[in-house]
Image (spheres, coloured by chain):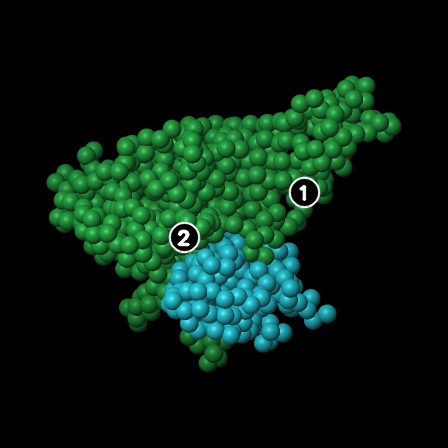
Chain colours: A green, B cyan
Amino acid sequence: MIVGKYKYVGKRITRIDARPKVDGSLKYPSDLYENGMVWGRVLRAKYPHAKIRSIDTAEALRLPGVVTVLTHKDIRGINRFGIERQDQPVLAEDRVRYVGDAVALVGAETKEIAEEALDLIKVDYEPLPLLTDPRDALKDNAIKLHDGGNIVHELHFTRGDTARGFEGADVVVEHTYRMQMMDHAFLETEAGFASVDRDGVLTIQSCGQYAFRDQTQIARALNYPQEKIRMIEPYTGGAFGGKDEITVQILLALLALKTGRPCKIWFSREEHFISCTHRHPVEIRMKTAARKDGTLVAHEVWALQDGGAYATLSGPVLCLVVEHCCGPYLIPNLRVDGWAVYTNNGMSGAFRGFGATQAHVAMESQMNIIAEKLGMDPLQLRLKNAIRRGDTFGIGQEMVLAFGFDASLERALAHPVWRDREKIRRALDDGTVKNRWKRRGIGVACSIQGSGLGKGLPDYAATTIELNRDGTVNLYQGTIEIGQGSYTGITQVAAEILDLPMEKIHFIGADTGRTLDSGTTTASRVMYAAGQATLLAARNFVAKIKDVAAEKLGVTAGTLLNGDGAVRTGDGKGALTYAEIARAAKEPVRAEGVFNIPVADREFSMGLPHLYEQNILENGYFKNTGLSTYIVPSSWEAPEIETCPVEIPDETGPFGARSVAEVVTTPTAPAILNAIYDAIGVRFTELPVTPEKIIAALEKIK
Amino acid sequence: MISVTFTVNGKTVTVGTSPTRTLLDLLREELGLTGTKEGCGKGECGACTVLLDGKAVTSCLVLAAQLEGREVLTVEGLASDRIGKALQDSCVESGAVQCGYCIPGFLMAARALLQENPHPTLDEIKEGLSGNLCRCTGYAKIFDGVRLAVRRLAK
Ligand code: FES
Ligand code: FES
C-alpha cells in the first residue's frame, strides 16, 4: 500500500467499532435478551459412538417451566447440515457418532430449568465399537461410520518422476510429523437469538461467518421457505473458522418455530469444547531430496487427516494441506497422496490457516533438516528454491499476481537477528549462575497462503452505497466483523473514493434482509474481495451523484469534481453538497459494486498456540473441556513481535491491498521448532511441544 | 428468593433473586448491563471482571447473597471515572480492540491495577492482567493501551 497519496487509506485510523466495544454498548449475539423469551439447551450424546434405541422426553416435559422438548421427530426437513456435504444431523435420529452430537433440545422459562430438564430426558443407547485411529479408518475391515464409508476426501497428484529425482540426489530426508487437535477458544461461545412474527418470518441474530449460507442451511434442514428466514450476523466475539459451520442457528430456528416465542441459545464453554469444530489432527510423512548446491529435486508426501464424525470442511482443508505441501518452493518431481477420514474423535473443520498450517510445520522442518545436512544457511536454501512471480509451483498453481517472497527472504537475511545469530545464541554462555541452565535458539520458517477461496470456487463480493437526506451515506456489506477490522478497512476505502469523513459513513453489516451476498468471512478474503467491491460501488456512486448534480447545475457530468462531501464545477462556481444532491434527486441514489476475484488467484496469499495447545481425547471423550485445563496463552506468554513488512502492491486489490490474516500465523510453530533444535539439538516432529516434553528429551541425551 | 440492595455504577438497585444467582447473571439479565461478558462462567477467563468495592472480581463467581450494601462498577460506568475514561480512550487509540469481547474485562482489571499502582512496570501490568484471556490480539496492544493511559494520567 502506498501511504501518503491518500487521505484515509493507509492511515492509522481508529476502528469504527472500537468505541462501542470499550464502553460496553455493542451488542454481541450473546447479549440479546427479551422478556418472555425461551432458553434453549441441548442434550449432547452420552457416547462417542452408539445406536439410539429410544428417547423418552415425558418426564422432562412434566418439569414446571419446561416449554418444550424437541427431538428429530419434530423436524420436517432433511434434518442434516454441513457446508460441503450434509451429513450431520441437527438432532440425532438412530445413531450418534461423537460426544458433541445433539440428541434433544429443551426450551424452558429459565436457563436453570432448561439445564435441569436435560437430566430428565431418557435416552436408551446401545454403545457401538469405536473408530478412533485414523489409520484404521482406511482399512477395508474397519467399521463404517457413514453409508459411503470412512473416507471424506482423497487427493493424489504426481508431477515428474520422484524415483528418478531421489536417485540423482545428494541428500534425502524422510520424517513423519504429527499435528494435534486444537480448539479455537474464541472468548464468546456460540450464541444467538431468534424470533418469529405473525407471518412466519424468522429473524435470527447469531454468531456465524456467512449469513447467506446459514440461511440456506436452515431452510434445507427444516424445510422452511428461505425467503422467510432473515439472518443478522454482523459482530461476534471471535471466530477463527470455528463459527463457519452451523452451530446454534438451526436449533434456534427450530425452537422459535415450535414455541412461537423469542428464543435464546448460548453454548456453555464445556459444550463448546466438545461440540464445535477443531483444528484437524494431521499426520504427514515427507521424503525430500536435494542436490549439493541446495536445489530441491524430489518430494513425496503422504498425509492423513482426522476429520472426526462429520464432513464439514474436511475436504477443502485436505486440499490446502496438499496445495501447501511444497511450501513456497519449486520442486520438479512431486508425488502427494492425501486422505481425510471420519472417526469418532470429535469434529474438525475450518481453523485459521486451514490445512496450510499443518503442511508448513512439516515442510519448514524438512527445509532446516536439509540445510543442516548440506551445511547451508537455511535462509539461503529457501532463497535458492523460492518461487517467483510467473512460476508454476506446488500442484500446478500459477503465481500470476504480485508476490514478495524472495524480497522477504533477502530482508530476513539482512536482519540483525539473523546476521548476528551466532553471537545472540552464545550471549547466554557466559558461565553465570543465572544463565547456566538457559539455552537460546534462533529459528526461521516461511509460509505461503492465498487470499480468497481458491481455484474453481466462485468468489465474489458486493457492496451497496446509498445516499441519505442529511448527506451521510449508508454502506451495506454482507461480510462479518469477527475481530479482523475489515469493517473499518472497507469504510476507509469508501471514504477515500467518496472523499467523505469516516463518521459520515454508516456501516450496515451482514444481514440477509439488507445486504447483498458477499460470500464467506474466511480464507483471508474479506479485505481483498469486499474491499474491491466497495471501491467499485463507491465509483458508481460518485458517477450517480455527479449525474444528479450535472442536471441541477446545467453542466455535463464530466466537468464535475467530487470532494469534501460535495460536487463542484471545474471553475468552482457551482457546487452541491451531498445533502443537496439527495434532495434534488428524483429517485433514491443507490449504487452497487460487485467484484469477482480473478480465477487464477490462488498463488499466494495463531501461531504460538499451535506449539503447545491440545484437545486431549481418550476413546472419543474430550478430557480438557475448560479454560483451566485447555491452556491458552495468557498475558505472560505474549511474545514481543517486530514486524518488517515487505510491501509489493498488488494491482488487483483495493489500493494495492491484500488480506494478511492467516498467512502470518502459519510459520510461527515451525520457526519455534527450528529454534528449539538450534538451542538444544533435539528435533521435535510432533506437536504440541510442552516444557515436560523438552525436559524428557533432554534427559534422554544425557 | 431474597431481596438484595446494592449500588451499580453509582445507582442503588434492589432485586429479588435466588441467593445463588451470580452477580454476572444479575447484571446481564436483570439490570440489562450486557457490557460485562461471560466467557466461561467458572472464573477462568476474566471476561466478566467488574469492581466490587473497588477490587477486581470475576462476577461469575460472586453470588447474589454476597451483594447486600456493596458497590459495583461495570464497564458501562467506566467513562465517568478519570482512570476508566483514560483507559478506554487509550485502548481505542492503541488498537487494543479486535473482536472486543475480552475488552470490558481487561479495562476493569486495568482500572483496579492503576488505582492501586498508578505507575506499573510492564511486568506489573502483565501480572495485573494475567487473569484475563484474549484470543485475538496477542496482548501486546492491550499492554500498549494501558501504558498510554498511565502516561496520560501522569500529566
Ligand atoms: S466468565 Fe467469569 S471468569 Fe470467565
Ligand atoms: S479482542 Fe477478541 S478476545 Fe480479545
Q: Which residue is mark 2?
A: A189
Q: Chain of mark 2?
A: A
Lower position in the chain sequence, tag 1 or tag 2: 2
- Count of residue discs: 2
A301 or A429: which is nearer to us?
A301
The answer to whether A658 is drawn above or below residue A13 in the figure is above
| Chain letter for mark 1 | A
| Label 2 lies in ligand 1 vicinity (Cβ under 8 Å) | no
Classify mark 1: residues with Cα within 10 Å, few (<14), some (14-19) or many (20+).
many
Q: Residue B114's x, y, as percent?
A: 60, 72
Under circle 2, the secondary element is loop
Q: Is residue A174 left or right of residue A395?
A: left
Q: Is residue A450 visible?
A: no
Residue A375, relative to residue A659: is it above or below? below
Q: Amino acid at mark 1?
A: Met
Residue A468 appears in the figure: yes
Q: Secondary structure at mark 1?
A: helix
Depth check, front residue: A482 or A618: A482
Q: Splitting the image into 4 quarters, where does residue A84 fall? A: top left
Reading the image, the residue beneath label 1 is A502
* Relative to A463, A207 lies left or right: left
